[in-house]
Amino acid sequence: MKNFDYHQPTEIRFGRGRVNEVGETVARFGKRCLLVTVTSFPEIEPTYEKVKDSLRAAGVEVAHFDKVLPNPTTDIVTQGTEMAKEHNADVVLGVGGGSSMDTAKAIAVEATHEGTAWDYLFFRDTQPSEKTLPIIEVTTTSGTGSNVTQVAVITNPAEKYKSAIYNSIIYPDVSIVDPELMLTVPEHITASTGFDVFAHAFESYIHPNGSPYTDLMATESIHLVAKYLTVAVKDGSNLEARTWMAWADTLAGLCIANAGVTLPHGIGMAMSGIYPHVMHGEALAVVYPAIMRYRYRSDVKIFAELGRIFNSDLVRESNEVAAEKSCEAIDDFVKDIGMWIRLENLKIPEDELKALAEASLVLPDYKNHPRVASLEDVYELLKKSHKS
Ligand code: NAD
């Protein structure tokens, strides 16, 4: 067995009704809290009320920054930071999907450091320090895993570039995962965020930094997604499916924090950076069918295993056949959850694919695989993902 490290400082409070513990949880870290969310809408309002009631009951004074947008920008982080400073916040609480949770992390950095959060991206010499405010996250999607990762993804609209702070200091102190909060997630967002869970687990499984520990969690997560995502998409009120998807998301988040992601995420990050209307999960689902075919021969055993998880008939086939058929199994899965999208459906013009391919190789994620894609390879993959 190979040597490996595993690190995870975030305290996880998992289970139905656990959102009611948010007040006492936040109070352990501070008494002046900045709550970070998207603007309220009828389905999410009861969650915000529960959170605020719990905070008040615990004696926490709360200022509510509710201006987060999907694929959050540097401007949004700065607006939230101003509110954090005005409120003299000593703890930041993100409640929502990855966009709200990442904004909360970035605000915790920007409010306590010189310059802006963008000055602390993973590749810069300057990194966030111990001054970073404590971070508590309550996830309402399943999901990005952001509630258990050291990553905050933000977009700089001036540069049309999506990148990340990646530093252990922004691991949330506590992550509350309450599946009841996910009952209101609409069908398409359930599918899109659920596909992200699958992508995190699978990309961690094939990642060179994977370990026996992350492999265990990744395979369990993939099994759960295969069993429960379609159920959750078709019946959002199914609490059992929501609960297992929340656990699959948590496992996949723990995986990416210790292994990482590969080429699909490199392309996905570039895509949402240039085309912010594209949801993160959509950006992944659109390229997976082509990437499966590009890659399955590079690790026949793993792709065969994947194929058999999604299509149990493949247990009777050889690894070679099961690996090849894993491509169709993933096609069927993508179709079942209503995520069979082409780049043209996402309004991405064919004559911009070259620029998208170039942007996809800026982050180092694409190198994390035995078959490292060239610019030409990525361009071809994007062309194959463009039309039906
Ligand atoms: P999101 O946070 O952008 O939310 C998408 C939509 O879902 C929003 O309109 C929101 O209002 C709605 N929504 C959320 N919870 C809801 C609920 N309970 N009921 C009804 N509607 C609800 O989506 P996301 O996919 O969770 O996050 C995407 C962001 O996370 C991207 O910016 C992506 O790059 C980032 N990300 C971060 C990490 C990380 O480790 N930090 C990992 C993966 C992705």
Image (cartoon, rainbow, N blue to C red):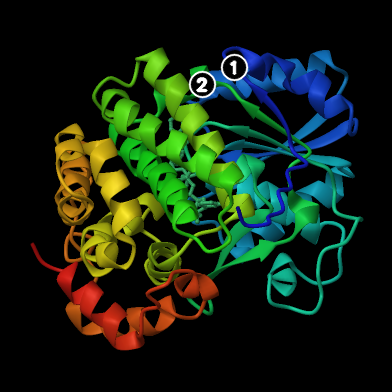
From the image, tell me which residue sits under label 2: 179
Above or below for 45 versus 261: above
Q: How many marks?
A: 2
Q: Position of residue 39 (x, y in %)?
A: 53, 39
Q: Camera-side residue: 373 or 286?
A: 373
Above or below for 240 versus 37: above
Label 2's element?
helix
From the image, tell me which residue sits under label 1: 15
The C terminus sits in image quarter? bottom left
Residue at 19 percent of width and 54 percent of height: 327
Residue at 50 percent of width and 80 percent of height: 362
Quadrant in the rendering for residue 57: top right
Q: Camera-side residue: 97 or 263?
A: 263
Q: Disc 1 marks which amino acid? A: Gly
Q: Position of residue 137 (x, y in %)?
A: 68, 36
Quadrant in the rendering for residue 267: bottom left
Q: Is residue 66 visible?
A: no
- Mark 2 and mark 1 in contact? Answer it, CB < 8 Å: yes
Q: Position of residue 265 (x, y in %)?
A: 43, 62
Dot 1, crowdedness within 10 Å: few (<14), some or many (≥20)? Answer: some
- Earlier in the chain: of badge 2 and badge 1, it is 1
Q: Disc 2 marks which amino acid? A: Pro
Q: CA distance from mark 2 to mark 1?
A: 7 Å
Residue at 70 percent of width and 22 percent of height: 52
Above or below for 15 versus 175: above
Above or below for 387 versus 241: below
Label 1's element?
loop
